[in-house]
Amino acid sequence: MQKPFITQPKLFVSASDLNHPILRSLDDTEALLEWSEIEKSLSSIYASNTGRPSYPLLTLFRALLLGTWYRLSDVQLAQCWYRDLLFRKFCHLELGGAVPEASTLRRFRTRLVEHRL
């Protein structure tokens, strides 16, 4: 007798899942860029220490890179974070943590333009 198909997903991702070669496909790209220099350039965007904490600037910048490389709208990119471990890893987002919404990406892009970055 055939076993029934189980539709309940795993509750946890194993360490071996996180070390799968497909999740390392952007590692070479990450190694090419000088992230500390990019972060210095972005630091002027959010100078205030008051208010709600924002997402790390490099997380948002990495997100915009992914959106450009994969031709995704802000909405599509925000949706990808819920299903794509590669995108979460590249943007340094925790597995169970919050992800930026499309409106956050739009506001960040607007600030980049305002600051001519």
Image (cartoon, rainbow, N blue to C red):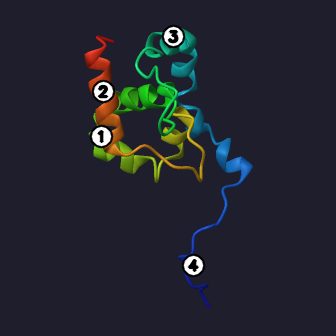
Residue at left offset 37%, top offset 46% = 101
Front: mark 3 or 4:
3
Q: Helix, strand, or loop for circle 2? A: helix
Where residue 81 appears, x then y in whole percent? 45, 47
CB atoms at circles 1 and 3 under 8 Å apart? no
Residue at left offset 34%, top offset 36% = 105
Relative horizontal placement of residue 66, taking residue 58 as reference (left or right): left
The image quarter in which residue 85 lies: top right
Q: Quadrant of the N terminus?
A: bottom right
Q: Which residue is mark 2?
A: 109
| Amino acid beneath label 4 | Ile
| Amino acid beneath label 1 | Asp
Q: Earlier in the sequence, mark 1 or mark 4?
A: 4
The image quarter in which residue 72 lies: top left
Q: Earlier in the sequence, mark 2 or mark 1?
A: 1
Cα gap from disc 4 to disc 2, whole angstroms: 42 Å
Where residue 45 appears, x then y in whole percent? 40, 19
| Amino acid beneath label 2 | Arg
Q: Earlier in the sequence, mark 3 or mark 4?
A: 4
CB atoms at circles 2 and 3 under 8 Å apart? no
Q: Earlier in the sequence, mark 1 or mark 3?
A: 3
Q: Helix, strand, or loop for circle 4? A: loop
Where residue 28 appears, x then y in whole percent? 56, 20
Residue at the outermost bottom position:
1
Q: Which residue is mark 4?
A: 6
Nearest the viewer among 55 and 81 is 55
Q: Earlier in the sequence, mark 4 or mark 2?
A: 4
Cα gap from disc 1 to disc 3, whole angstroms: 24 Å
| Amino acid beneath label 3 | Lys
Q: Which residue is mark 3?
A: 40
Above/below status of 13 relative to 37: below
